[in-house]
Image: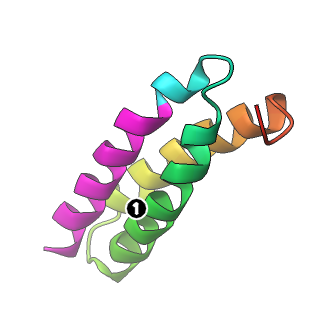
Amino acid sequence: MFNIIAWAFGLLSLIIVIPSTIPFLGWGNWLALPLIVIGVVFGALSSSDSGRNFCLIVLLIAAVRLAIGGGFI
């Protein structure tokens, strides 16, 4: 059950992160980061690792985009 919740948070975060790669929409990554962390926590509580790993991949995408944009833009 926790794995399904982690996947749901990961998919919701991915829907937010993909448009946030466009310049001047980087603020969406800040909105997605708490959701990603919640997904990672639920994935860690799960017996399966796929939800957690998916959330970590989405976190990596968001973190790289924030690093490229300087964190604000």
73 w.r.t. 28: above or below: above
Q: Quadrant of residue 67?
A: top right
50 horizontally vs 41: left or right: left
Name the amino acid, label 1. Arg
- Residue at image point 43% right, 76% down: 41
18 w.r.t. 13: above or below: above
Reading the image, the residue beneath label 1 is: 52
Q: Secondary structure at mark 1?
A: helix
- Residue at image point 50% right, 66% down: 37
- Residue at image point 55% right, 28% down: 20
Q: Quadrant of residue 9?
A: bottom left
Which range is magenta?
A: 1-17
Indicate the position of residue 55 as horizontal and vertical percent values: 44, 53
- Residue at image point 42% right, 37% down: 16
Indicate the position of residue 8 as horizontal and vertical percent values: 23, 54
Q: Is residue 6 magenta?
A: yes
66 w.r.t. 21: above or below: below
66 horizontally vs 62: left or right: right
Q: Main secondary structure of the magenta part?
A: helix
50 horizontally vs 5: left or right: right
Asked which colour scheme the image uses, the reply is rainbow
